[in-house]
Image (tube, rainbow, N blue to C red):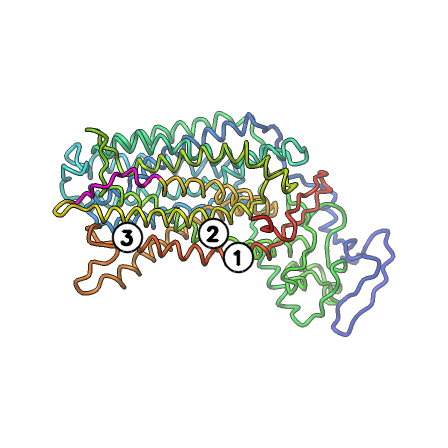
Amino acid sequence: MDPFSSTNVALKKQVTGEGVISWENVVVKKIRTEEEQKIANSKPSLILKKTGGWTAASILLANQCLATLAFFGVGVNLVLFLTRVLGQSNADAANNVSKWTGTVYLCSLIGAFLSDSYWGRYLTCAIFQLIFVSGLGLVSVSSWFFLARPDGCGDGALTCVPTTSMGVVIFYLAIYLVAFGYGGYQPSIVTFGADQFDESKPKERNAKAAFFCYFYFALNFGSLFSNTFLVYFEDRGKWTLGFLLSLGSAVMALVSFFFGTPGYTYVKPCGNPLPRVAQVFVAAARKWDVISVKADELYELEGSESAIKGSRKIFHSDEFEFLDKAATVTEDDLSERKNPWRLCTITQVEEAKCVLKMLPVWLCTIIYSVVFTQMASLFVEQGDVMHSYIGKFHLPAASMSAFDICSVLICTGIYRQILVPFAGRLSGNPKGLTELQRMGIGLIIGMLAMLAAGATEIERLKNVVDGHKVSSLSIFWQIPQYVLVGASEVFMYVGQLEFFNGQAPDGIKSFGSSLCMASISLGNYVSSMLVNMVMKITAKGDKPGWIPDDLNTGHMDRFYFLIAVLTAFDFLIYLFCAKWYKPINIDDSQNGIEMEKQGDDVLAKV
């Protein structure tokens, strides 16, 4: 049997000089191999088990809330633990926190790959949460037995005894286990939560869009406790107690996750996407000299089923047309059994195109993540040298991030209840603003946050008293910069979650969610690189540099203004990338969904 024989279709073909098959009457979609016939007949479904809905999603939101509480119980005050307990300098501590936070979110790519390819969302979430719990247990042990001695040290007054090499090694192993566990779990849990809603039902499709807002709400609600109560204990030298409470929260999160097991919707993994994407580039390279053909003459399977296991078809797009050669049928393709390294389907080509199209937008979000990461490092160090007493009560510098969290919670409510309906009436978009428009607004607000932080630092330096480490300026001057960062998060990070999850093909949904976390990761590394570059350039001779150990002799305000300028340039590039971007066009004939399109000019109303 000819592997490229067709059924019930009279084919009329012409062979061009380059050996390309030019088909009439749109017949390439009718080509089938024996293997593809089996795929079509089997009618694979993405859904392994269907229950889900808001009941299952609510359990996952509670799980996210508890896990975030545990994570930030370690992360939010880590910079002060490194300076007070391990004795590191301000610049070294800020860099180490940036590298650690970067590693957290870089691990999201590993979790996303395993989730999409082999394990599925549920198993990936379970395994990485177990690693997370193990890491937090080891953090508690290292603090209790090796580092925070004597009891109560590291409160800013009582000095800890010098650390041992073993204690430091165990501590770093522990916090990087925390990074690996939490980072690998994040993209899978948000995608798993989105899986609980059936897109074929308009009501559940709207609920899925709301889920991303509530997910970020739960994340910030969980961190509110760690940024207030846990920070208070840790700032008073009760580091081990804070870490143990974080461990307890992580255990509760894991128990709640397993509790919801019978009611979840489970989606099949779609196999390793790396060979699929590589096949497209190899096939296109092997046919580099082949003449391009029309879109309706490119190779695709017949019917609604896709050659990618568990994935819907994707319609052809005009971007990156050189990759279309991978789906161009030549005489060599007809004369031998189908070779995926020579001939790919349109859906497979479009999957590769989707990754390429999302990359420019994703790269533009990295500078925003540089803004975001300042809250866990320089904002805390800045607040630590400001007047932070309310009467006799000392307010920990790290607890100021509670204003960021409250800003997120309030702005999320305002966005969902006021802005979405109002903008929806103006634009005709039921979401109010497109994801790309929201991300652009987030960049602008993030730039304003850096300007506010720089202005606060100028005022702090004006109120420095000779011979005193702490400025007389109140720490509450930091409120505007925290509130602005929180408002920008609602637009940027919620927009990112919706955008990358919605624009990623079915076979790489977790990868799409992980791009948001990977942006935070690279933002931390870029922040660390900027600190190192600035200190090498500005700390010469007798000059202490912009971010010295004694911040009263530095100019951290200039560093904030530098980030603001970089964000402004980044916004201009982002405008171009967002206007160029065209959304994915999925064939929803399998389940009757009509894909919502964002339009050509996604930023027309920004």
Q: Which of the two discs, 1 and 2, labels the residue nearer the N terminus? A: 1
Front: mark 3 or 1: 3
Q: What residue span does the magenta drawing correspond to?
A: 469-479
Residue 389: horizontal and vertical position, in percent? 22, 33
Front: mark 3 or 2: 3
Identity, as a three-letter code, of the amino acid under mark 2:
Thr
Residue 475 part of the magenta-drawn span:
yes
589 to the left or right of 415: right
Q: Which of the two discs, 3 and 2, labels the residue nearer the N terminus? A: 2
Label 2 secondary element: loop
Return the residue found at the far left: 467
Pointer 2 residue? 365
Evaluate whether residue 106 shows in this view: no
Identity, as a three-letter code, of the amino acid under mark 3:
Met
Pointer 3 residue? 556
> Which one is nearer the viewer's eye here, 265 or 334?
265
Residue at point 82%, 67% (across, down): 14
> Which one is nearer the viewer's eye here, 158 or 177?
158
> Which one is nearer the viewer's eye here, 345 or 75?
75
Q: CA distance from mark 3 to mark 2?
A: 23 Å
